[in-house]
Image: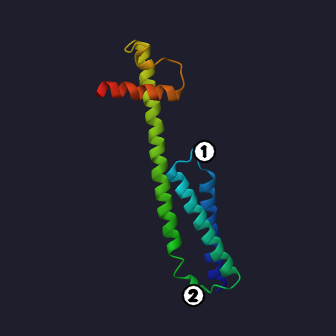
Amino acid sequence: MLIAEGVILGVLSSLFVEFYTLETNKLPDKTPEVYLKQVYVNNVCGVILLLVGAFATSELTELQFLPIAPTCPRLLQQWLREMQDAWMIRKAEEIQKYVDRNRLNGHLKQGLFSESQCRFRRHRGTTDMIFAASRIQEKCQM
């Protein structure tokens, strides 16, 4: 029984550490998805701490805990997959922004665009360049 307790407490503590590291490595921009996932992490961490506390004080016996134990790794795997998907989408968007910016700079250097077209000028901030690029794209699609 002591070995089983140690294994279960070890799994729970490692889950808590994993959730805590994922939560503290959040990017500063808080989109609704990031906020909801942070709330989810906080709730799961709270439940895990309650279970660990109940198990450590013998309020929860091993037989009562066994039906709950298999769901914890599944929840963690599902949450990690969702976080990985969101992270990959965010990275793909960043890469696409850099590609678009470099293409526009290349076109300006070659003289394919006049610098006054759609208020687009070189050596401006990334946000201005992305906004101008989207306006050029909209203009071309019309």
Instruction: Check contact, mark 1 vs mark 2: CB within 8 A.
Output: no
Direction left: furthest residue:
142
**Residue at numbered disc 1:** 28
Q: Which amino acid does label 1 sit on?
A: Pro
Q: Residue at x 57, y 87 (%)?
A: 63
In the rendering, at what x and y percent does residue 96 appear? 43, 35
**Quadrant where the C terminus is found in the figure:** top left
Q: Residue at x 50, y 76 (%)?
A: 70
Above or below for 43 versus 100: below
**Quadrant where the N terminus is found in the figure:** bottom right
What numbered label is drawn on residue 132?
none
The answer to whether residue 15 is visible is no
First-in-chain label (1 vs 2): 1
- Front-most of 1 and 112? 112
In the rendering, at what x and y percent does residue 40 appear? 55, 62
- Front-most of 71 and 115? 115
Q: Residue at x 57, y 86 (%)?
A: 64
**Residue at numbered disc 2:** 63
The answer to whether residue 39 is visible is yes
Q: Which amino acid does label 2 sit on?
A: Leu
Residue 126 falls left or right of residue 11: left
Above or below for 11 versus 18: below
